Amino acid sequence: MRGIVLRYRVMAYITGVVLIVLCFVGIPLQIAGYPALVNVVGTVHGILYIIYLIFAAHLVWKLRLRPDKSLVVLLAGTIPILTFVVERWLTRRYINPALAAEAAAASPPAPARTA
């Protein structure tokens, strides 16, 4: 589970940063007459978003989220800054409890003490 969470988090942050660059740097430059950055960063974001979707879908499936929650997670890479917000919400609400339950199930019970 930890590997799935790590892959999701890395892609959420990378996708979010690239989308911010695209929206707040690339698009104003395109409006000013310099479309080169939008062409490159837009393509990079598109590729990274597909990878994000794969990792997010794997995490959503592993956590068994409801369809409405799953849709929020999957679409977070399309709105600037939302990937960061959704990642924190998902961590607090679903990932941390799932990791705690996994750790509790994996740890062997303590041996009984005899007096």
Image (cartoon, rainbow, N blue to C red):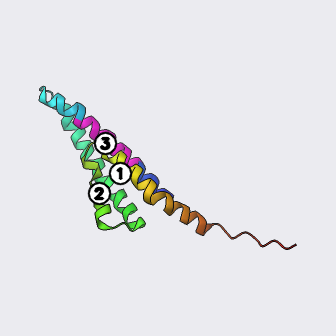
Q: Residue at x 44, y 54 (%)?
A: 91
Task: Choose top left, top right, bottom left or bottom right for residue 73.
Answer: bottom left
Categorize mark 2 by other alpha carbons within 10 Å: few (<14), some (14-19), many (20+).
Answer: few
Q: Given the image, on which type of amino acid does mark 3 rest?
A: Ile
Quadrant assignment, res 75: bottom left
The residue sitting at 33% across, 58% down in the picture is: 54
Q: Residue 82 placed where, x, y %?
A: 31, 46
Above or below — where is 25 with respect to 88?
above
- 38 lies left or right of 76: left
* Disc number placed over residue 86 in the picture, else none: 1
Q: CA distance from mark 3 to mark 1?
A: 9 Å
- Helix, strand or loop at label 3? It is loop
Label 2: state its secondary structure. Answer: helix
> How far separated are the C-alphas under marks 2 and 3?
13 Å
Identify which residue, 36 or 69, lies in the foreground: 69
The residue at the far top in this view is 32
Residues at marks 3 and 1 touching, judged by CB atoms closer than 8 Å: no
Q: Which residue is mark 2?
A: 72
How many angstroms separate mark 1 from mark 2 (CA)? 8 Å
Q: Where in the figure is residue 12, as x and y percent of width and height?
A: 36, 48
Q: Is residue 4 visible?
A: no
Question: Which residue in the structure is indicated by mark 3?
Answer: 81
| Comes first in the chain, label 1 or label 2 | 2
- Residue numbers of the magenta segment: 10-23
